[in-house]
Amino acid sequence: MGNRYGGLKQVDPMGPSGETLMEYGIHDAIKAGFKKAVFLFRDNIVDAFEQNFRKLQQHIEVEYAFQPLNPEVISGDQKLTYSERQKPWGTAHAVLSAAEAIDEPFAVINADDFYGPSAYQVMGDFLANANVDRQQYAIVGYPIEKTLSPFGTVSRALLEINGQQDLRQVVERTKIQEIDGAIKYYEDQQAVTIPPGTLVSTNFWGFTPAIFKELQSQFSRFVAENNQNPKAEFYIPYAVNSLLESQSASVEVLTCQDNWMGVTYKEDKPNVMQQIRSFVDQGTYPERLWN
């Protein structure tokens, strides 16, 4: 929804020929072997999207899915009631909302983030060998220092990893920024330093269809527990942590050669556009992404 950005980042032109960050992601995904793109919307922006991005259907299979604002939630044989909402139920519910369009291993990304070609390649390689019936998942982690904004604080999920590069826990931290050369967040009004190189999530996940049954069960419980809180959100890290705690799933932490870029604030845009310009000048991308 782009509240801090001041508009829909997903459709804001960033490339030299008016490309969005999402288009660079789709371009990189196609090169890495992905065959289908599922776009998840709130229904009030789909018309604008179709008008601007119909061209993508010439390059990759396209399907649409919608995240309802007030979905019907069934627990057992009982329909759950809850306070009417003004915002969607969060990222894990977003993934669940795309279930009918997906029956193969799949990646999840933010449409307004730039992950880099090698991120799609390592995730594509992982998913190409994934068993659709197994709960063996993956996430691309980025060093914390590569995901900050000089224009304000950010929220990031810190990845706790064991010696085999498997995820142990995802810990959400808010109001992260660099202060006097150190990266810090605040907890109980105390500044806590995050060591450089700490890997964080920027919401690049890899799942198999086995995740949907788990998400459905967890979402029903989440709604039952938060039915009077219209701001409660069912996030991917929350769902993944539940699976890790119950030892129902494993998550491999992948790394890549490229830097992540995002536009949390409007002031971030010129730097992102300059970086994309440099990629074009280096030959990583063509001047016009879709010839």
Image (cartoon, rainbow, N blue to C red):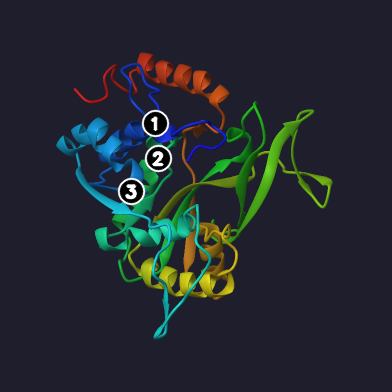
Badge number at residue 43:
3
Q: CA distance from mark 2 to mark 1?
A: 7 Å
Q: Earlier in the sequence, mark 3 or mark 1?
A: 1
* Residue 287 % position (x, y): 29, 16
Q: Which residue is mark 1?
A: 21
Badge number at residue 111:
2
Which dot, 3 or 2, sits closer to the camera?
3
Residue lying furthest right in this view?
190
Q: Earlier in the sequence, mark 3 or mark 2?
A: 3
Q: Are marks 2 and 1 in contact (CB under 8 Å)?
A: yes
* Residue 238 % position (x, y): 56, 62
* Residue 163 % position (x, y): 60, 58
Q: Secondary structure at mark 2?
A: loop
Q: Secondary structure at mark 3?
A: helix
Label 3 Cα crowd, 10 Å radius (few <14 / some 14-19 / many 20+): few
Q: Secondary structure at mark 1?
A: helix
* Residue 153 % position (x, y): 67, 36
